[in-house]
Each structure stands twice: as C-alpha cells, then as structure tokens.
Amino acid sequence: MLRSELISIIRKKKSFLCIGLDTDLTKIPQHLLKAEDPAFEFNKQIIDATHDLAAAYKPNLAFYECNGILGWQSLARTIQYLKGFDVFTIADAKRGDIGNTSTQYAKAFFSPEQSGMDFDAVTVAPYMGEDSVKPFLDFPGKWVILLALTSNKGADDFQLMVNKGSGIKLFEEVLLKSRNWGSPDNMMYVVGATKAEMLTEVRRLVPDHFLLVPGIGAQGGSLQEVAKYGMTKECGLLVNSSRNIIYASKETDFAQKAREEALKVQQEMEKLLSSVIF
C-alpha cells in the first residue's frame, strides 16, 4: 500500500485506529470454541463489526504461532479476509536476522504466491543493523515498522540508555541511524503511547515518518497526549488498541461490544484530526 493510499483511508474513515488481533483462545467467548476455526471466526466477527472504524489491523504473530499449523492457517485466513476491506494490515512479528534470513522472513509476509500471506507491513527489530532490515524494504508497496521506543516497562532497560560520549539515548541512535535506510514512504517506527512525552524528540528526528503507537487502553497511554506530541498535518499516526476492544465482552455480544469500544476511540480521533490541516 502506498503512503497516499494509507492517508486516504485515514481521511475517509476519520480514524487512525489500528485494532490488534491478539487472539487468545483462552480469552475468546467460549461458544466460539465449537467453530471449525475458532480464532478465525472470532477475528472475522471483530472485523465485520469494526472495519468501517479502523484504518488498520495488526495480528500479533505469537497468538497464532503458539497453535502450530492450525494457528498459521487461522492467520492466513484472517489476512485473506482482511484483503476484502479498505484497511492497512500489519504482521506484528518483530523479525530481524542476517540478510539472507531476513529475505525469507520478508517472503513469508509479503509473497502471497509463496506463503499465502500478503501483509502491507511487518514489525522489525533494528539491533542487528541495516543488512537485517534492508531485505524487507525490497518489496514495492510494503512497509517496515521498526521498533524504536516500546511501551513495555522493560523498555527502560536498554532503549533509554545514554551514550556518555554523545549524550544521545539509544532509541535516538536507532532513529538517527535508520531513518535513511528507507523513507517516509516505506518505513514507520514503533513508539509507545506510555512514552508520549518523548514524542516531541521523536518528531524532531523523524518529522515525516508514520508512527505505530501501541499502549493506549489497557496499558494506560493517553490518546490526547499522543496526538498532541506526535500528530502531523498528514496525521502520521496509527494508534493501536487490542484488549480494550476485542475483549470488551466474553458473551455472544462480543462483536457489538467491540464495535462500541472502537467507535468511542474513532469519535475521539475524528475530533483530534479536525485540529490539523487534513
């Protein structure tokens, strides 16, 4: 998907919501366990109820890989189903390895004729350097979403470490080093909503790149703070919410409850978008 197409989706839906499909078979409504493919059936109903409110969907691969081949089949069916809607799709895989291995990972998510998967983007870890990231950027119309400043508590262990020589934090080094590997047309960065106050510094270093922002909702991040410090005139944000939406109910009304939660976020996003030239 081209950058212009992503911006068009955000403008049309008045939403920069990304819904995380972290589908845990121990948490989905119990009646779905009778379905032939419970994970896909759950995802399908969530997508049907929310696709007009969401700009993107992000399956977290761990929740599928843990179920072996059945999980991969659920994932493949989910991404194939999502292709029927006007949405941006993200494989939250956090891959990254030496060049020839990264090439195979890229094929896994970007080559439908080979793997059955056709995501628009994949999350990638940057710490093995440029040659581990470049293979993902060789696919036209596909995106790398590079981990920069994550929302988990343990992010402080390394990402905020300061280089005593330069005075620059490690996550800032990642942004500085990587911003020319790709371009704002094919590279985004993960910046957690729980680190919203640091978005000003992030924007100083990467003013034009889209940011994927997890951490609102269950993790306590503020959508208003994220927009205040991170939004650009082209929006420049995809803000992810997972548990608060997809697990809003464990009953047969789960899809309707998910829609109600997604609508609350979308309406808030519509107001925030009205404050920029968009």
Image (spheres, helix red, strand yellow):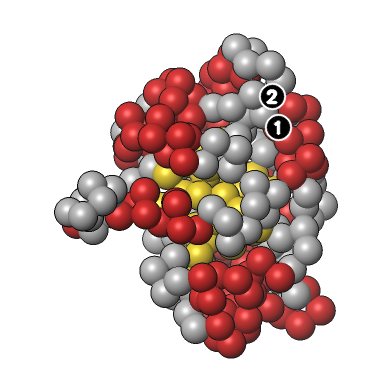
Q: Which of the 4 image quadrants contains residue 173?
A: bottom left
Q: Amino acid at mark 2?
A: Lys
Foreground residue among 113 and 242? 113
Foreground residue among 67 and 168? 168
Q: Which residue is under mark 1?
A: 10
Task: Identify which residue is drawn at 33% across, 29% down.
Answer: 197
Looking at the picture, how far across and down is residue 230, in whole percent?
Answer: 48, 30
Foreground residue among 190 and 13? 190
Q: Are marks 1 and 2 in contact (CB under 8 Å)?
A: yes
In the image, taking residue 9 as reference, residue 101 lies left or right, namely: left
Looking at the picture, how far across and down is residue 153, in whole percent?
Answer: 23, 49
Task: Identify which residue is drawn at 74% across, 44% down.
Answer: 3
Q: Secondary structure at mark 1?
A: helix
In the image, taking residue 203 as reference, residue 36 lies left or right, namely: right
Looking at the picture, how far across and down is residue 120, in whole percent?
Answer: 70, 58
Residue 99 seen by the camera: yes
Query: Looking at the figure, which quarter contains the C terminus?
Result: top right
Q: Which residue is under mark 2?
A: 14
Height in image: 29 above or below 278?
below
Task: Identify which residue is drawn at 56% across, 17% down.
Answer: 272
Height in image: 109 above or below 252?
below
Q: Amino acid at mark 1?
A: Ile
Outermost residue, front direction?
165
Rendered image: mark on residue 64: none
